[in-house]
């Protein structure tokens, strides 16, 4: 019996990397993509040797074509597609510029949509698609309007995509993490590492569970959605945030 196969975009660090490990440990053949050369090199060194690590910019459809061709050659088909690649460029309305807006939507929205479209011929009947969005798409956060809009656009697509994919029993769902200890969260422009850690500690104290999320928290949810245990779940959003945002 052929092992299941997964493609994880944005899989060289943080949530994507943890998901690669979780699926690999469950017997999946796994390929991940990353945009930055340093994260790709680190993933090749740290992820299990069997995981295929590919450099790709999700905003470039030619890069996506190359990834799909590589996955077709190596795996033949896909049983799981995790659309996790994303960027965050915090800026208030007054500070936002066109270049930042275009970059964020090109990676977060266009990239995810067309990766799914191009991967569709490889997806087996009954496959699972999981899109990482984030609770910021539906909750207010100063300076987050552009990133929230790019993720929120994906959330509004999911019900329609679920109906379009249902004849093949392909499921599509969103996982929305809260604040999670990832390299993206720690890389706060204009702050020292000590200042960032102080901020993260304060954020953790405000969470009902008293901590920030771990990449593994989100990865386990994605692994569940990829499994047969979630065979009747589609068109949904699962929030993985330790209760963040529930208080009035």
Image (tube, grey):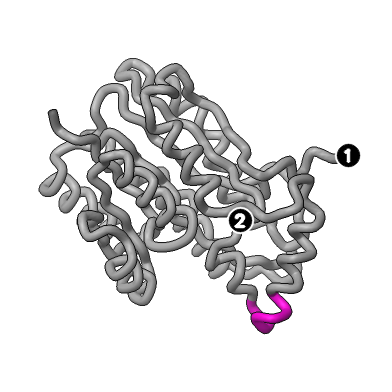
Q: Does 194 appear in magenta?
A: yes
**Which is more toward the observer, 219 or 210?**
210
Which quadrant of the figure contains the C terminus? Answer: top right
**Which is more toward the observer, 48 or 100?**
48
Residue 141 appears in view? yes
Residue 42: image location, x then y, percent? 35, 72
Q: CA distance from mark 2 to mark 1?
A: 22 Å
Q: Residue at x 26, y 41 (%)?
A: 28
Q: Dot 2 surroundings within 10 Å: few (below 14), some, or many (20 or more)?
A: many
Q: Is residue 89 left or right of residue 79?
A: right
Which quadrant of the figure contains the N terminus? Answer: top left
Q: Residue at x 47, y 45 (%)?
A: 219
Q: Residue at x 81, y 54 (%)?
A: 206
Q: Which residue is mark 1?
A: 248
Q: Which residue is mark 2?
A: 180
Q: Is residue 122 left or right of residue 229?
A: left
Total numbered labels placed on residues in the image: 2
Which type of secondary structure does the marked residue at label 2 adopt?
loop
Q: Residue at x 76, y 60 (%)?
A: 203
Q: Give the residues drawn in magenta, as a range.
A: 189-196
């Amino acid at each position: 019996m052929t092992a299941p196969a997964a493609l994880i975009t944005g899989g060289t660090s943080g949530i994507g990397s943890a998901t690669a490990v979780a699926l690999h440990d469950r017997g999946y053949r796994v390929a991940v993509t990353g945009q930055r050369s340093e994260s790709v090199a680190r993933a090749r060194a740290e992820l299990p040797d069997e995981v295929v690590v590919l450099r790709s910019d999700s905003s470039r459809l030619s890069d996506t074509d190359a990834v799909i061709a590589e996955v077709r050659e190596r795996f033949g088909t896909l049983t799981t597609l995790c659309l996790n690649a994303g960027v965050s460029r915090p800026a208030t309305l007054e500070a936002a510029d066109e270049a930042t807006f275009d970059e964020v939507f090109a990676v977060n929205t266009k990239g995810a949509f067309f990766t799914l479209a191009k991967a569709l011929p490889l997806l087996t009947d009954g496959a699972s698609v999981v899109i990482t969005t984030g609770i910021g798409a539906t909750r207010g956060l100063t300076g987050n309007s552009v990133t929230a809009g790019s993720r929120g656009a994906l959330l509004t697509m999911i019900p329609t995509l679920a109906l379009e994919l249902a004849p093949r029993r392909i499921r599509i769902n969103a996982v929305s993490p809260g604040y999670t200890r990832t390299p993206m969260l720690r890389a706060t422009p204009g702050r020292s590492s000590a200042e960032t850690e102080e901020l993260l500690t304060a954020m953790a104290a405000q969470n009902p569970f008293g901590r920030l999320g771990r990449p593994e928290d989100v990865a386990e949810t994605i692994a569940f959605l990829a499994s047969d245990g979630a065979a009747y779940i589609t068109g949904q959003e699962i929030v993985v945030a330790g209760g963040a945002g529930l208080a009035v």
